[in-house]
């Protein structure tokens, strides 16, 4: 009778982590993930790709999912993958859906610590925008006699990673479940992460909670200070024009051995 209620302690098995990838990137991007943070969440992380790859199927312990989406870098193909990621999360029964790109490093313990601040039975959309103001689009509604409307919403940048609680995902199901995510994307003709924001912020009227600890390579990685690395949820890297890398500033690594940090 005296047992204290611990409201929510997030366990690894509460999380479904999806990583979007494509056949052209398997060899250049997956090893860095598999050799590092994947090892902390081997049973919770799934790679969503567009081709069967026995080598990486083996490396990931059977965690490569061939979405059968097109392998071209167009909006439709990317929305198709996000749609499969979302549906697989719904089937998983887990409490949290966290999406990342294949050029993210995920600080798994910190991700769990972050999620522990939120109740998955409530509606949560956690991530970070990469634009300074909400996106504004002009939408022609279902009634053609009405004038096109200005619609404003925030979206979490896919390349920084974002998380959605199960409660929110269930509310999204009528509009976005069972492959319907692609239909919404087609309707607004915007990329997958923008479509996600549109569904959650505009259609469902639930707000994005900004979490500064998510990072995409749209930010300069060198400005992240080393003594806060452990607090960050995700990192990224990219190669700019003229071979300069946008990477974390960490001493003691050789550019040859580890160009991506
Ligand atoms: N991607 C994909 N299909 C493609 C190209 C990219 O699924 O044809 C994925 C890629 O694996 C990554 C994300 O989309 O997870 C973003 O790709 P990239 O980093 O190349 O481009 P960015 O948009 O970050 O500049
Ligand atoms: Mn990228």
Image (cartoon, grey):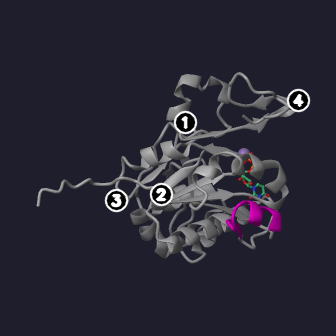
Residue 25 found in image quarter: bottom right
Disc 2 on helix, strand or loop?
strand
Residue 145 visible? The answer is: no
Magenta-colored span? 54-65
Q: Which mark is first along the chain, 4 or 1? A: 1
Residue drawn at 64 percent across, 52 percent down:
38
Residue drawn at 75 percent across, 66 percent down:
57
CA–CA distance in space, label 3 to label 1 = 27 Å
How far from the left and from the top, in percent, is residue 122?
Answer: 34, 59
Q: Nearer the viewer, mark 1 or mark 4?
A: 4
Disc 3 on helix, strand or loop?
loop
* Magenta-span inclusion, residue 81: no
Which residue has dot 1 on it? 132
How far from the left and from the top, in percent, is residue 157?
Answer: 59, 47
Residue drawn at 62 percent across, 72 percent down:
183
CA–CA distance in space, label 3 to label 2 = 10 Å
Q: Which mark is first along the chain, 1 or 3? A: 3
Q: Which mark is first along the chain, 4 or 3? A: 3
- Near mark 1 (Cα within 10 A), the count class, few <14, some 14-19 or many ≥20, is few
Which residue has dot 4 on it? 242
Q: Extreme left residue here?
A: 1
- Near mark 3 (Cα within 10 A), the count class, few <14, some 14-19 or many ≥20, is few
Disc 4 on helix, strand or loop?
helix
Q: Which mark is first along the chain, 2 or 1? A: 1
Q: Which mark is first along the chain, 2 or 3? A: 3
Q: Which mark is residue 122?
A: 3
Q: Extreme bottom residue here?
A: 178
Q: Which mark is first along the chain, 4 or 2? A: 2
Ligand 2: image quarter: top right
Q: Are marks 3 and 1 in contact (CB under 8 Å)?
A: no
How far from the left and from the top, in percent, is residue 205?
Answer: 40, 58
Q: Nearer the viewer, mark 3 or mark 1?
A: 3
């Amino acid at each position: 009778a005296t047992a204290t209620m611990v409201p929510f302690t997030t366990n690894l098995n509460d999380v479904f982590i999806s990583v979007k990838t494509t056949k052209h990137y398997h060899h250049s991007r997956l090893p860095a993930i598999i050799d590092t943070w994947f090892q902390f969440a081997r049973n919770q992380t799934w790679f969503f790709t567009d081709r069967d790859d026995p080598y990486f199927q083996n490396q990931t312990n059977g965690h490569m999912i061939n979405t059968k989406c097109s392998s071209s870098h167009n909006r439709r193909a990317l929305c198709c993958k996000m749609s499969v990621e979302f549906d697989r999360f719904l089937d998983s029964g887990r409490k949290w859906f966290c999406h990342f790109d294949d050029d993210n490093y995920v600080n798994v313990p910190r991700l769990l610590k972050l999620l522990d601040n939120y109740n998955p039975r409530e509606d949560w959309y956690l991530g970070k925008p990469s634009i300074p103001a909400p996106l504004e689009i002009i939408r022609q509604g279902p009634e053609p006699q009405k004038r096109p409307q200005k619609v404003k919403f925030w979206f979490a940048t896919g390349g920084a990673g974002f998380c959605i609680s199960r409660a929110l995902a269930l509310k999204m199901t009528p509009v976005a479940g069972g492959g319907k995510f692609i239909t919404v994307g087609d309707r607004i003709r915007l990329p997958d992460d923008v479509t996600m924001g549109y569904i959650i912020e505009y259609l469902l009227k639930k707000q994005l909670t900004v979490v500064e600890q998510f990072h995409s390579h749209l930010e300069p990685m060198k400005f992240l200070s080393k003594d806060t690395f452990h607090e960050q949820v995700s990192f990224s890297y990219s190669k700019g024009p003229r071979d300069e890398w946008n990477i974390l500033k960490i001493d003691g690594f050789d550019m040859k051995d580890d160009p991506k940090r």
